[in-house]
Image (tube, rainbow, N blue to C red):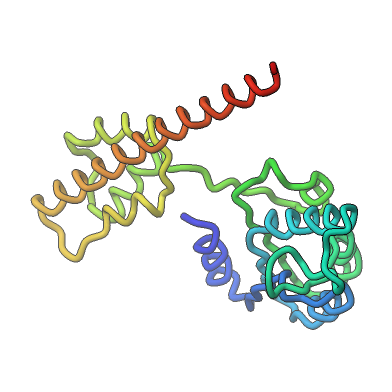
């Protein structure tokens, strides 16, 4: 299950309104405050890829220090003029907005949890941390039961091994298990298709490790000079 899928599931279960807040197009802190105060009760506010916004804040600081910005100090990303600050965001989600009446949830998504500022993710500001990890064999068996009506198959052992050696999301797995009709032939075809995809993912992961190793080795040599 992906991040957007999880949020959609929350919406369907709670019957809440959902808001997609794009910080990059919000003018400044004042505009952000107005937007948040207009959000209705019993709602979910989604802010996707928060790490991208934080990275942009860092780029702004560097531009100001190096005096490399243009006259109007436009953002380093063309066409974006948002002046929302990180401190402004923290104040709103941890202060006035969170204390206001109404059942309101705010969901941040990121692919780089380790890069987020600790002040954003500390318990009390973000009450729940949910990791959507890569697919493991137990998750695969649940999907095989749901989509193929299978509890076991001779290809399961191969798939279990490949899942340990590769990194794929549950959504990637489901794409290979979905089919319009159920038959023994289609079941084998779908499992073989998944196996081939896992083999490719395994090779890509190994190649990435090798490239990262070369980059580290090259960086070490430069430091030694």
- Report whether 147 appears left or right of 128: left
In the displayed orientation, state which residue is furthest to the front.
Answer: 225
Whether residue 53 is visible: yes
Horizontal arrangement in the rendering, residue 54 relative to residue 190 (left or right): right
User: What residue lies at 84% left-to-right and 48% top-to-bottom?
Assistant: 119
Is residue 93 in sight in this rendering?
A: no
> Which of these two is toward me, 174 or 225?
225
Residue for point 82% across, 68% down: 70
Asked which quadrant contains residue 78, the reply is bottom right
Residue at x 15% of width, y 49% of height: 189
Give whichever of 138, 194 is nearer the camera.
194
Which residue is outermost to the top?
224
Q: Nearer the viewer, residue 120 or 76?
A: 76
203 w.r.t. 3: above or below: above
Residue 12 x %, y %: 53, 71
- Residue at point 73%, 63% (across, down): 76
| Residue 196 percent coordinates (x, y) | 24, 42
Position of 158 compared to 5: left or right? left
The vertical placement of 213 against 143, above or below, is above
Residue 167 spot, x, y in % from top left: 43, 39
């Amino acid at each position: 299950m992906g991040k957007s899928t999880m949020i959609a599931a929350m919406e369907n279960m709670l019957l809440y309104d959902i808001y997609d807040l794009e910080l990059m197009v919000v003018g400044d802190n004042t505009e952000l405050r107005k937007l948040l105060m207009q959000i209705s009760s019993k709602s979910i506010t989604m802010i996707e890829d928060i790490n991208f916004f934080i990275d942009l804040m860092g780029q702004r600081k560097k531009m100001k220090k190096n005096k490399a910005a243009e006259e109007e100090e436009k953002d380093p990303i063309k066409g974006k003029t948002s002046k929302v600050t990180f401190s402004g965001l923290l104040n709103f989600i941890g202060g006035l907005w969170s204390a206001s009446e109404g059942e309101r949830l705010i969901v941040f998504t990121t692919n780089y949890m380790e890069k987020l500022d600790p002040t954003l993710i500390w318990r009390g500001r973000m009450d729940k941390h949910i990791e959507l990890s890569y697919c493991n064999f137990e998750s695969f068996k649940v999907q095989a039961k749901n989509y193929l009506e299978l509890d076991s198959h001779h290809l399961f052992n191969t798939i279990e091994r490949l899942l340990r050696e590769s990194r794929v999301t549950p959504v990637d797995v489901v794409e290979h298990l979905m089919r319009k009709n159920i038959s023994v032939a289609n079941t084998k075809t779908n499992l073989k298709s998944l196996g081939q995809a896992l083999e490719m993912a395994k090779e890509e992961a190994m190649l990435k490790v090798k490239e990262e190793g070369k980059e580290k080795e090259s960086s070490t040599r430069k430091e030694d000079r």
